[in-house]
Amino acid sequence: MAKIDITKTELVWPGKYNPDGTLRETPRVNLPFQVIETVNESRATQDAKNTPRGGVTLFEVYEGDEGDTFEEGWKNKLIWGDNLVVMGSLLEKFAGKIDLIYIDPPFATGADFTFQAQVGETDESLTKEQSVIEEKAYRDTWREGTSSYLTMIYHRMKLIRALLATDGTLYVHCDPTVNYLLRSCLDEIFGKENFRNEVVWRYGKMSNTKQKFPSNHDTILRYTKSSNFKFNPIKETDSEYRNRFIRYLTGNQVLYKTVKKSKDKLITRRIAIVEKRLSRLLHEDDVLFDFDLEFKVQDDVFRDISIIKGNSKENLGYPTQKPLALLERIIKSSSHEGDLIADFFCGSGTTLAASEELNRRWIGCDLGRWSVHVTRKRLLDIDNCRPFELLNLGKYERRYWQGMAFGDRKEQGDSERAMYEYLAFILKVYGAEPIPGTAHLHGKKGKALVYIGAVDAPVTIHEINQAVGECANLQQPELHVLGWEWEMGLVGPNPDSSQGSLMHDLARQRGVKLLLKQIPREVMEQTDAQEGSVNFFELAYLKAEVKTEGLAVCLTLEDFVIPNTDLISEEVRDKIEQWSDYIDYWAADWDFRNDTFMQGWVTYRTRRDRTLRLTSDPHTYEQPGQYRVLIKVIDIFGNDTSQAFDVNVNGE
C-alpha cells in the first residue's frame, strides 16, 4: 500500500488517503458482460460466417494477419453502465490494448443536463430531465465539492491508464474551472514527462458578460502512456488555407466568408479578382509572392471548429454534445486506421461516430439509458455502419450490488439475513411494508400485496401464479409484482381480450387485480431507502399483427400501451396525439433463439424525420418451419418493451 511521499509534490484532498496514510485503492470489479442486442448484423449473416453462438466469447477474437484492419469476429461495443465498473471489467481482455481514449467528464457544478426531446411526428418538443441514475452520479461527483470530484476522476484515470496501450494517448476535455486540478492528477498518474499538449478549443461562442473577459474556449489535455506514441501532424484544411491566402492578398483581416457576404460592390469585385488570381496560382509551379504556399500544421489552438448551432444537421439536442470535426481531428492525430478508440463518458456518441467514419474500432460507455439510445440511432444513421453490440453488466452487476449493499455472506443464516435486507430495502423504496407468515408474498402497500423478484433471474409465470394464488386465498384484491427481468412471453397482450395481457386476465378471474412493475436500475444508486425517490413503472405492452405468405412474414404494430400514464408529466401527455407517439424506435429479430436480440429490421425517428413506419418490410425465410419473432420497442423515455410471436411458415 502506497503512503504519502513527502519527498514529492502532489495534489492531496480528503478521501485520497486512508486514515493510516495509505493510498486508497482504486476499485477493480471484474464482472461478465451481457450482450443484449446486435445491430446491423442479422442472425442469418452471423450463421453464414460459421460463428456459432458460444463459439466465440465476448472479447476473444481472431488476432488477424499483419495488415488486417479489423480482426475477424470483432464487433464494436456500446455499453450501458457505470464506467468505473465497466472499465474494471474490461481490464481482463483490454489492459494495454486501447490506442486512444477521449473523455469529456462533467466539469461544471450546477450544470443543467436537461435537453429538448421531440414527441410524435410533429415539431413539438418537451424538456427531458436527467434520469435518476444520471442525477445521482452527478450529485455524488460534486457532493463534497472539489474533493469528491477529484476522487471520482482520480480512480477512473487510474483505470484508463491501465487500459491504454504502451503507445496510446489520452485526451481529457475540460474547462478553465478544473483544468489545473486535472493537470495535477494526470501528472501524478501518467508522469509529468508524458504531458504533451494543452489544446485550446476556441469555439466562437458569444457572450455579453461585463464582469470579466468573455469565456470562449475549452481545454483538452493530451497525455501519453510513454515516450513512444503515435502522432500524425494535422495540416489545415483547404478552406482554412484559402481564407488565409485571400486575407494575405487583400490585406483584409476579416474572415473571407464574412467579406463574401458584403453588399459593397467594390469589395465584391476585389474578391472576384483575388479568387481568379488564386485559382491560377494554385495551378502554377512558381511562387509569385513572398508567402508560404505550403499548408500550415495545426497548432495547439483550434480556431476553426465552432460549437454546434441549433439549426445544424449535426445537432441531436444533447446538452454536452461536441462537434464531430473536433473528435475527427483528435482521432486522426493520434491513431491509425483499425486502432481501438474508447470513450467512457460517450454522451451522444460523437467519439464513436467519428471513429466509425474514420475506420477505427471503438468501445463506448455511458450511464444514461437515453444517451445509449441516442448513440445507437446516431450510429444507425451512418452509411455502411459496421455491426456493433449493445452490452450491459445486467444480473452480474445486480448480484454484485446485492453483495456489497447487504453483505456477501457465506453462512446459511447470514445468507437468509442478506436476502431479508434486500427485500426490506426494495419494499421501503417502493413505499411498502414487510408482512410475515406468507409463503410467496413479501410486503403490502395500501390494499395491495407485493411480490419481489430475485436480482439475478427473471420473474416467471409460475412465480406469478403462486403469488396470485396466495393473494386469492387471503382474499386480497390486488397484487403488485416487482421484477428486474421477466420470462419471455409473460407480458404480451391477450389476443382474446381488450383489457390487457393473458396473465392479467387469469389473475382477474381469481378476483385479483395484477400489476407488473419494473424495478429500475436507479434502485442500485440509492445510498438509502428513500420512499418515492424512484418510479416503478408498470410494464408497457404492445400489440402486433403477424402476416405470413409463403416463406415471407410481415409485422404491423397495432397498439402500444404505457399503463401508468399518471406518472408521466402533464407536459408529455398534452403532446401525445396517438399511441404511436410514445414510440421512438422499434425493431424485429426474425429468428429469436432466446439469446441475444439480433436486429433484422428497424425503424426509428430522428430530429429531422419524425415519421415512424408501423409496418415492417417483409422478411423471407430460406426454409419452411417454426420461428420465433421478437419485436423490441423503445419508448420516448428510453425504456424498452419486447414481445415474442411464434410463426409457422410453410412456403405455400
Image (cartoon, helix red, strand yellow):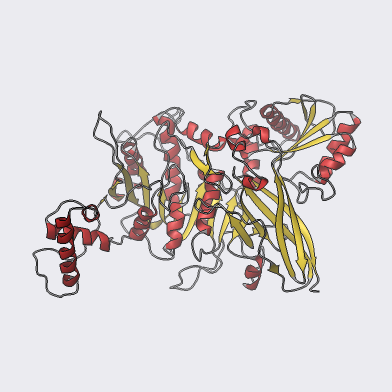
User: Up-down: is 185 above or below 542?
Assistant: above
Q: Please count the marks in the image.
A: 0
Between 143 and 314, the one nearer to me in the picture: 314
User: Up-down: is 613 above or below 501?
Assistant: below
Left or right: 561, with 526 as reference point: right
Q: Residue at x 65, y 51 (%)?
A: 633
Residue 592 visible within the image: no
Between 390 and 608, the one nearer to me in the picture: 608
The quarter in which the C terminus is drawn is bottom right
User: Up-down: is 135 above or below 621?
Assistant: above
Instruction: Residue 69: name its quadrant.
Output: bottom left
The quarter in which the N terminus is drawn is top left
Left or right: 387, with 537 as reference point: left
Left or right: 527, with 108 as reference point: right
User: Up-down: is 65 above or below 383?
Assistant: below
Residue 311 visible within the image: yes
Q: Position of residue 222 (x, y in %)?
A: 32, 49
Instruction: Residue 501: name its quadrant.
Output: top right
Q: Residue at x 85, y 27 (%)?
A: 437
Q: Position of residue 493 (x, y in %)?
A: 78, 48
Q: Position of residue 557 (x, y in %)?
A: 70, 54
Q: Position of residue 234 (x, y in %)?
A: 28, 60
Instruction: Residue 616: name its quadrant.
Output: bottom right
Q: Residue at x 59, y 52 (%)?
A: 391
